[in-house]
Image (cartoon, helix red, strand yellow):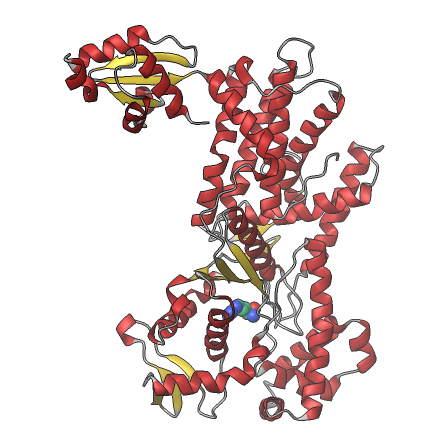
Amino acid sequence: MDYKKIVADAVFKAIDGQVATEDIYSKIEKPKIAKNGDLSFPAFILAKEMHKAPQMIAQDIVANIASDDFEKVEAAGPYVNFFLSKGVVSSDVIKDVLTKKEHFGDNHNGDDQVVTIDMSSPNIAKPMSMGHLRSTVIGNSIAKILTKNGYKPVKDNHLGDWGTQFGKLITAYLKWGNEDDVRRDPIHYLVQYYIRFHKEDIEHPEYDDEARVWFKKLEDGDPEAVKLWKWFRDVSLEAFNQTYKKLGVEFDTYNGESFYNDKLQDVVDTLKKDNLLEISQGASVVDLSDENLNPALILKTDGASLYVTRDIATAIYRDKTYHPVMNLYAVGSEQTYYFKQLKAVLKKMGLKSASGLHHIPFGLITVNGKKLSTRHGNIILLNEVLDESVKIAKQQIVEKNPTLADKDKVANEVGVGAIIFGDLKNSRIDSIDFNVQEQLKFEGETGPYVQYANARSQSILRKAQDIEIKADGNSLSDEDSWEIIKLLQSFPDVVKRANEEFEPSVIAKYSLKLAKSFNKYYAHTRILSEDNELGARLALVQSISIVLTESLRLLGVKAPKEM
Ligand code: ARG
């Protein structure tokens, strides 16, 4: 609703139409401080036409305003300050939510431009750990937020499926591997071989030489090396996909590091042609001293490519394929320096999307105080954490709502949602320690708390199915509903801010506030009591449910209607 229009019309009437509404409209301002009202009209612009002192005009306008759209209208010197009545704002916001439904808060700022997001990107033959959870769920949520802001995201899973570690893995497998074991429980056994390799190569440095040979063979396309590598990749991807399915996350592409193998020579040639490549102690590097960064190592002394070589090829490929306005990387903060180097190299190469390259860092994650590492065998598997969470959710549901139909489905939505929400409610950059029990509490800052508020609103709406919902919020001017209205009204801005900051926690924190305000309202108000305002209260409850559900969706969390 255009509040300026309401003010302009009222002023127009108050001055007997001496100045056109459009001219009034264009001069209306939004005061910076709340005590000056919601909108303000500078009466001095009428001084010439009306041959009167601005202060006088302001006072006359105040005296002649006849509209209950305003709670009060005040003259402040040459200004007229308008305070909108809560009823007007309420009915307006609620009408807006109820007509737009899940599209409430959508905007077109992105202008349909493409944004690539590098996300999840686990390493083949290693379990997807809690460490990759953050990249997966942060990237997934940012993609949804981008869409809501009118962008077209492309989610790319940059699998770590290439590098010298595959030489080690092949060596280890050929020494100690067992085909049946790998078929039965691929990641578990592959990790065991890898761990054993790292234990034993301390006493057997020759293992490292063997591993180097195997990686070289792999690079040269040796059939045995390629066959094993492909097999490891396939079984790993199968396992990852189970986790993605649980999390409800999908990707547009899985172009892992290996996808860029045949594009690396081009990178090297281009760098050479642009005179960017220097030889330093036998290795090829790009000097970045003008950016105050260490040189980027492009080729090792033996000519082998590196992680960054593949990332340069990736960025060029994305640029050519998608023409993105932004190229985002949801990757842990330990790689911050690395992404500065990558961006600097790409800028030197004149890549179009280089200026739109943003590293979206996030902090470390620990589970019940335990750090995560594959090498030393101290791993907590994401899959196990998810399963545990679903199990606890199921117990809670059985206790609290024994008659609920479809308990398993709801337990899944609550258990998985709790883990996702528990991650996303934190500012990305903060390190978090994860306690699964804690995240599943129905009270406090948790996913289930928000889900439960939504389920409660749905249950109210179910009970009142036959009653007409009235979107004219005129009767809703009590303090609790006003707090909710203001929150609902701010949702479109929250959506924009989450996008600008690439920060899902903005949405998560918002949803907690809205759920809390609703619970307060619920505690103080007999929502279903049969009086004149019942329809308006139901409209409020429905609006809350729409926005809670949409907030959770933006986080990648389901909103069960009953739990
Ligand atoms: N596979 C890497 C890791 O687990 C993350 C890859 C991030 N993406 C990229 N384009 N560098 O650390």
Quarter of the image that includes the C terminus: top right
Q: Is residue 440 above or below residue 228?
A: above
Name the foreground residue: 426 vs 357.
357
Furthest residue in direction top, as rendered: 63
Q: Position of residue 304 (x, y in %)?
A: 50, 88
> Quarter of the image holding residue 85?
top left
* Point 44% across, 47% down: residue: 109
Q: Is residue 145 above or below residue 160?
A: above
Visible residue check, residue 515: no
Q: Is residue 49 left or right of residue 288?
A: left
Q: Is residue 408 above or below residue 335?
A: above
> Quarter of the image holding residue 392?
top right
* Point 67% across, 74% down: residue: 125
Total numbered labels:
0
Visible residue check, residue 96: yes
> Quarter of the image holding residue 40?
top left
* Point 58% across, 38% down: residue: 445
Q: Position of residue 441 (x, y in %)?
A: 66, 38
